[in-house]
Amino acid sequence: MTAVTPAPPSTAGAPAPADIAPGSRSGGRSRLRAAAGFAFGAALLFAVAPLALSDFRLALLAKYLCVAMVAVGIGIAWGRGGMLTLGQGVFFGLGGYAMAMHLKLADAGPGGMPDFMQLYGQLDELPVWWRPFASPWFALPATVLLPMAVAFGLGSLVFRRRVRGAYFAILSQALAAAMVILLIGQQGTTGGTNGLTDIQGFFGYDLDDPVNQRMVYFIIAGVLLALLALARQLIHSRYGELLVAVRDSEERVRFLGYDPASVKLVAYVVAAGMAGLAGALFVPAVGIISPALIGIVPSIEFVIGVAVGGRATLLGPVLGAVAVAWARTALSERFPGTWTYLQGLLFVVVVAFLPGGLASLWALARRRDAGPEQSRRGWPAPARRRASRAEAHR
Amino acid sequence: MSDDRLDGLSVRDVRVSFDGFTAVDGVSLEVPAGDIRFLIGPNGAGKTTLVDAITGLVRATGSVCFGDQELLGRPVHRISRLGIGRTFQTSTIFEELSVVQNLDIAAGARRSWATLARRRRGIPDEVAAALETVGLTGRADQLAGTLAHGQKQWLEIGMLLVQDARLLLLDEPVAGMSHEERDATGALLETVSRDRTVVVIEHDMDFLRRFARSVTVLHAGKVLSEGTVAQVQADPRVQEVYLGHPVDAGPVPSGLEA
């Protein structure tokens, strides 16, 4: 087997004959456009937003951007890999709780116990499984690695047994429900329904200080951009193409000699890691993590944003997640109680009439612009068709 | 392709049953290396099920060897990696990807994760060669879903080529094709069989007469007859069960089996 060696470095900058999209934009130009897009996004997040928004609104935006990180992961797992993950709250929660446990322990000081444990009063000392989280060297990697490990375990079991479609969605949702029940049931060590609240400091910085809140916002914005860059690399890599192939025809991929289970597992684990990171950053931004923030309802809300924005695109999930989260705040400020219905309606309308999300409107408009040229390239004249037949003849 | 070995397929006493119904009932056949073997038989004869058994899609008893490798009992993707490639009655290309992307994926089952994580640059040599062989060079960047029906089938065959399949199992490759497309497909099979073994399930008798090197007739899960086109056509049992009534094909011109 002649393993495919990547093209020699000399051609690396030259336009590749075929890019990810048919109709072939050159690789160089698309990379340039992506760089410009990232620069624009960075300017928006790092300069415009902090100048234009009040501290209160900026803190809200920080929260939305955390949701957007989860959305990037869902875009990969669901949009590209076809796995409808209705339980991303589990991974978001694992990341969030890992971070919150560390911050609570840091607040309590060396040898101290988190306030709620003293309040419920049944514990003489810190539970064993809390102890490692006192060290940032354990807690910080754990916010990402713990969700990834859980996703790996679950995914290995599920994908090899060829559980997919609605069954996978229900299973992932059940996991979210189970996690919430577990957390509430262990009130003495997890804070129960209240969750881990009243977090004061973030690695020595007082979170009540607006300047520090702003710093947290900048960290979140930077991480989101980094995750987008990672997602873009993943989507445009050979693996990204393979993932789409698995989504569209898992059986066929198997007959090509791949194990689709491992292909899906990678996307699922990456999405879980992103959700975990998002949860970890959500904690300093909002100051709380609780079962209500990671259960079935938030898990579905993550997915709605992605569906509205356009699940198979890079930016669609991010913009959709931010837009839906923003609409939720704006509308429930004015009409409390109606948002739930509106959100449900939005989801139904998008799924029924615009399965590609709002991003597909954008793509549609672009195709209309490029109309005549596209048709010339895409649907060739009969003469050319005959020529290709003749070629097959030889 | 570094692996130039030509191997034959050896099927011995293969049985497949579903809930008591025996779809393949003790089939044995030998396909020598480099053959173009046609599998024919009325609907329900077990042709596709036999191919399913060979490729690991359904559970079977007996023995299937390609070269010296036993295939039965291995999972689908492992069998594929031994050089067994197949197509299906309906086209199963990845319609949302371009022709090149389809071929590149087919070429890559043995790629490392490090290679997978990088972007494809240009068109790999074996993909370019397959594009040339199946006549889709001019459509490399087109979405596979927008190809004409015949071209989709050729793309499927192209995917088997880059996959480095040394045994091609094609399920009704010319169904729904125009006359010229059939000719082109037949020529393609002849090219391909120079360094590969080909097994074709087909209903089209005209196509069979022109391109088969040998024929196996299945009926009710058993091998009914086997031989050259002329031998099989002359077999009265075949005429009875397959053609429905005896002596319909008329005298077979000599030399047609070539």
Image (tube, rainbow, N blue to C red):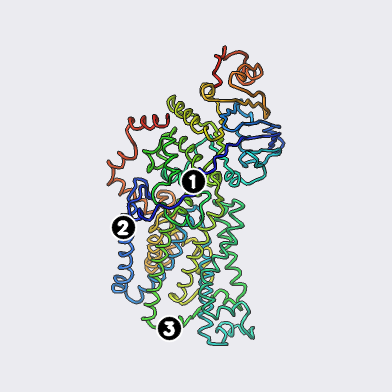
Q: Secondary structure at mark 1?
A: helix
Q: Chain of mark 3?
A: A
Residue mark closest to the camera, 2 vs 1:
1
Mark 1 sits on what residue?
Answer: B107
* Structural crowding at the residue carrying mark 2, measured as other residues with C-alpha within 10 Å and reported as few (<14), some (14–19) or many (≥20): few
Q: Which residue is mark 3?
A: A205
Q: Nearer the viewer, residue B118 or A132?
A: B118
Please give the label number shown on residue A33: 2
The disc placed on residue A91 is none
10 Å crowding of disc 1: few (<14), some (14-19), many (20+): many
Residue B195 visible in the displayed image = yes
All told, the count of numbered labels is 3
Three-letter residue code for mark 2: Arg
Tell which circle, 3 or 2, labels the residue nearer the N-terminal end.
Answer: 2
Q: The residue under label 3 is which amino acid type? A: Tyr
Q: Mark 2 and mark 1: span between their CA atoms?
A: 30 Å
**The residue tagged with tag 2: helix, strand or loop?**
helix
Q: Is residue A261 left or right of residue A55?
A: right
Left or right of A103 on screen, residue A310: left
Where's residue A50, x and y in %?
32, 73
